[in-house]
Amino acid sequence: MSETIGFEDVLLATKRAMAEKGADFIYKLAEREQRMAEGYSSQDVECLYFETVAENTKPSCIVGHVIADLDLPHPSEGIGVDSYFGDLRQRGINLDDRAENFLSYAQAAQDKGLPWGEAYDAGMEAAGG
């Protein structure tokens, strides 16, 4: 059986994350320096969907918050957002096209250091919203 996550569901989850963090929130990976010292490339440490601090795993980046809010399976570490969508499809979970476009562009904007409000706007533009 297949399940489809709609654009509106993704928007609501993103809005809840922005309500919690603020539209002016700029994501910074807490473990970035440590991961760079461990030999990860700068490209591999731009974002983590979830971070574990003191044995407590919490959503980290904008897409991680959406994943947690919608109770979706956690992605493997180091997997990009588009690959994650493919993994979900293999599990019978589909995001509609607008939802995928929204999340891909919001994630890319966040990874460029833009505040979440601007990342949201970038996702909306990409999704035709």
Image (cartoon, rainbow, N blue to C red):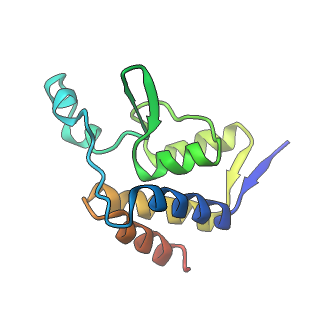
The image shows residue 72 at horizontal and vertical percentages of 63, 41
Residue at x 66%, y 61% (from the top left corner): 9
The residue shown at (48%, 62%) is 19
Q: Is residue 121 left or right of residue 29?
A: right
Task: Report whether 1 appears left or right of 42.
Answer: right
Q: Residue at x 56, y 80 (%)?
A: 129
Of residues 122 and 24, the one drawn nearer to the viewer in this rendering: 24
- The picture quadrant where one finds residue 34 is top left
Query: How many numbered marks appear?
Result: 0
What is the quadrant of residue 5 in the picture? bottom right
Dividing the image into 4 quarters, which one contains the N terminus? top right
Image position of 79 with respect to 52: above or below: below
Q: Residue at x 64, y 48 (%)?
A: 70
User: Going by the image, does 24 lie left or right of 101?
Assistant: left
**Taking 24 as reference, is 4 above or below it?**
above
Q: What is the x, y in percent for residue 18?
A: 45, 61
Question: x, y (%) of residue 95?
Answer: 66, 56
Residue 67, quarter of picture: top right
Examine the rendered structure and indicate whether residue 47 appears above or below residue 96. Answer: above
Relative depth, front residue between 77 and 71: 71
